Image (cartoon, rainbow, N blue to C red):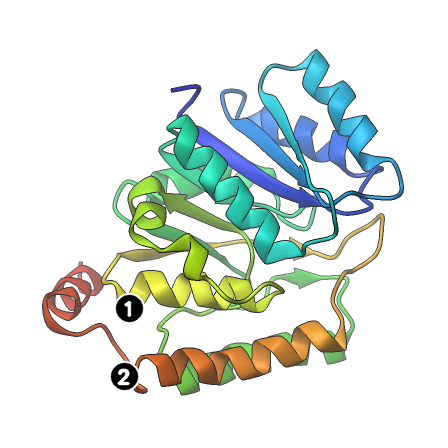
């Protein structure tokens, strides 16, 4: 096994962000390994990453041949991390909106949880530099997801996560159908419906300072319809069933 913790960071046109985010990760988590999954960035991000990997044996790079999307990038990273034997596998944005200082806290919570989610909204709103309309859309999306699926987390659309390998091993990664930001909802929902314990870590989310957002109307539409598809696939059940339900209810009371 190369290491215990792997942080997956997808990139597309993030040339100015990759060095700072890697330095920030290793400042507080020097033993963590980073896998950058680059979506064939036209701005030269891939070349910057190759140089970083040459200079630091804790950094790895996977180059995609096309722009496959966020979900496909993470699935590629999950499979790579599982094959290499990592115990904890993180999702993290390249733009600095997910503070690497929180990694040790995620790992602490992961001692008693199988999936740990970063939450922007539990115990208050901790979002910096977002316009009001985007904040309202994000919060409304969370309410919508909980209403339709019953997923009992405060920030179901967030993308800062820590999976234990047992959770990812239990999921048929080839059967994950979403790709944009709805990918975050689907993975958490699948883990919860399987009875895995979910923990939450309050985070401060700061909008990117460099580069540009990849959010689009098409991605938002995918997320909207995917929520109904998930609920339909499980016959609109609002919690795990059978033994998984008993385990989840027991864990939620701890």
Query: Judging from the image, what secondary structure is the residue with disc 1 in?
Result: helix
Report whether residue 123 is seen. Answer: no
Decide if residue 215 is on the left or right side of residue 183: right
Quadrant into which the N terminus falls: top left
Q: Name the residue: 60% across, 62% down.
A: 126
Q: Name the residue: 22% across, 64% down.
A: 252
Query: Judging from the image, what secondary structure is the residue with disc 2 in?
Result: loop
- Residue 177 in percent (x, y) is at 50, 66
Decide if residue 40 is on the left or right side of residue 83: right
Quadrant into which the C terminus falls: bottom left
Residue tagged 2: 237
Q: CA distance from mark 1 to mark 2?
A: 9 Å
Q: Quadrant of residue 196?
A: bottom left
Q: Quadrant of residue 153?
A: bottom left
The correct choice, above or below, for 10 with respect to 229 in the image is above
Q: Name the residue: 53% across, 36% down.
A: 7
- Residue 118 in percent (x, y) is at 49, 55
Q: Quadrant of residue 19?
A: top right
The correct choice, above or below, for 142 with respect to 207 in the image is below
Report whether residue 131 is seen. Answer: yes
- Comparing 29 with 74, the one in front is 74
Q: Which mark is residue 193?
A: 1
Decide if residue 115 is on the left or right side of residue 54: left
Q: Label 2 neighbourhood size at 10 Å, few (<14), some (14-19), many (20+)?
A: some
Which numbered disc flags the more N-terminal residue, 1 or 2? 1
- Residue 183 in percent (x, y) is at 53, 63
């Amino acid at each position: 096994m190369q290491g215990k913790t792997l942080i997956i960071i997808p990139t597309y046109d993030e040339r100015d962000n990759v060095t700072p985010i890697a330095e920030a990760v290793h400042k507080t988590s020097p033993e963590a390994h980073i896998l950058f999954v680059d979506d064939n960035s036209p701005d030269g991000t891939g070349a910057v990453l190759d140089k970083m990997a040459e200079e630091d044996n804790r950094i790895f790079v996977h180059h995609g041949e096309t722009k496959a999307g966020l979900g496909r990038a993470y699935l590629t990273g999950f499979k790579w991390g599982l094959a290499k034997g990592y115990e904890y596998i993180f999702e993290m944005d390249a733009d600095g909106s997910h503070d690497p200082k929180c990694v040790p806290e995620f790992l602490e919570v992961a001692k008693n949880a199988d999936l740990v989610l970063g939450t922007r909204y539990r115990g208050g709103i901790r979002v910096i530099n977002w316009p009001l309309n985007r904040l309202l859309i994000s919060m409304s999306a969370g309410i919508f997801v909980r209403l339709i699926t019953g997923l009992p987390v405060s920030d179901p659309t967030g993308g800062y996560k820590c999976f234990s390998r047992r959770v990812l091993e239990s999921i048929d990664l080839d059967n994950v159908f979403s790709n944009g930001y709805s990918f975050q909802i689907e993975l958490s929902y699948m883990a919860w419906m399987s009875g895995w314990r979910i923990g939450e870590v309050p985070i401060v989310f700061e909008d990117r300072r460099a580069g540009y957002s990849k959010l689009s109307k098409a991605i938002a539409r995918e997320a909207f319809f995917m929520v109904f598809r998930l609920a339909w696939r499980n016959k609109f059940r609002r919690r795990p069933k059978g033994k998984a339900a008993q385990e989840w209810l027991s864990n939620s009371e701890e």
